[in-house]
Image: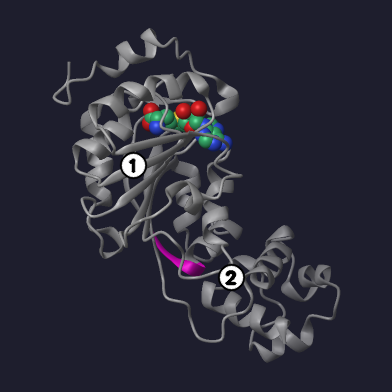
Amino acid sequence: MYEDGLPPLRDVISHFGLDAKKSLGQNFLTDLNLTGKIARSANGLGGCNLQDSIVYEVGPGPGALTRALLMHGAHRVVAVEMDPRCIEAQKEIQAAYPGRLDVFEGDALKVNEQELIGDTEGRPVKIIANLPYNVGTALLVKWLTLKDWKPWYSSLTLMFQKEVGMRIVAAPRTKAYGRLSVLSQYRAEARIMFDVPARAFIPAPKVTSCIVALTPSEEKMATPKQEILEKVVYAAFNQRRKMLRSSLKALGTDPLPYLNAADIKATCRAEELSVEEFRRLAKAYEK
Ligand code: SAM
């Protein structure tokens, strides 16, 4: 038994027969010290303490992170999980923390998180999750491309494969800089908090993972519609080796007038543009 009175995670995994399914991106954590570190790293992020916050967790699995969040005092945890076997395993945690854990069966890509969370009583919401690697990027894009900004959450603390984490925080003129870097840094401050070795997971993946922290930024002046920004970024990076005067033709009109209006050299390539230059470019294209 651990200090929360619940059995070790390895026992939970064998008791509920949670042999990992690749199709669900299942790599389970078993060390509550590590998940405690993840929970603590979210404390104070976005100016909000964990204890005051409601946590939205995707894919609680056998519950290593869920338990750490509750042990470290999250006011309430709302989780969405696709695997019914894991929902069974979560029932023991619900019993140990009455009224503080709600688990819903569903696909995190499709759910309306705010409906699941319900009344927040004015509390901030933190998203904290060890994401299934096969939908991790799609989930991040879902949360960063909301129509309304500022968003309904105050911070994101997410586990990704290290290579994805590096793309999220990458600077211009580097190999890792691309669509995901611009989308992430356009609306949020992103940083890598720490690495998590492959051996921390059951089964162990082939690569190192990392925890990425993102806090939403204030909406900037002269912001283009989000879908316009996405369109421009997509077209630019879709042919990243080409100059913008050529790659942006995919948007259907001559790019030179709006490249000039945005004061961006037509001979630049996508990877040379800062996030701020992408904002100017998208605004000029929108006009
Ligand atoms: N949080 C657990 C941990 O740290 O040990 C499990 C993490 S595991 C990487 C990802 C979890 O997400 C699995 O439990 C899996 O069943 C669940 N999952 C996969 N795809 C999902 C989806 N689209 N929506 C909700 N949960 C999903």
Which residue does the numbered mark 2 point to in the structure image?
A: 272
Q: Is residue 43 above or below residue 66?
A: below
Cβ of mark 1 under 8 Å from ligand 1: the answer is no
Mark 1 Cα within 10 Å, few/some/many (few <14, many 20+)?
many
Quadrant that contains the C terminus: bottom right
Q: Is residue 15 left or right of residue 73?
A: right
Instruction: Give the image location of residue 265, x and y in percent.
Output: 67, 83
- Mark 1 residue element: strand
Which residue does the numbered mark 1 point to in the structure image?
A: 77
Counting residues from the start of the chain, the first of labels 1 and 2 encountered is 1
Q: Amino acid at mark 2?
A: Glu
* Residue in the image at 64% along x and 75% along y: 225
Residue 95, which numbered label? Answer: none
Q: Is residue 190 above or below residue 249?
A: above
* Residue in the image at 28% along x and 51% along y: 42
Q: Residue furthest bottom?
A: 261
| Residue 34 is inside the magenta segment | no
Instruction: Give the image location of residue 126, x and y in percent.
Output: 35, 53
Which is the main secondary structure of the residues drawn in magenta?
A: strand
**Residue 133 visible in the current orientation:** no
Instruction: Give the image location of residue 218, x and y in percent.
Output: 42, 75
* Residue in the image at 36% along x and 61% along y: 154
Label 1, label 2: how many angstroms apart (C-alpha)? 41 Å
Q: Is residue 78 above or below residue 229?
A: above
Read off the magenta span.
186-190
Q: Amino acid at mark 1?
A: Val
**Residue 196 visible in the current orientation:** yes
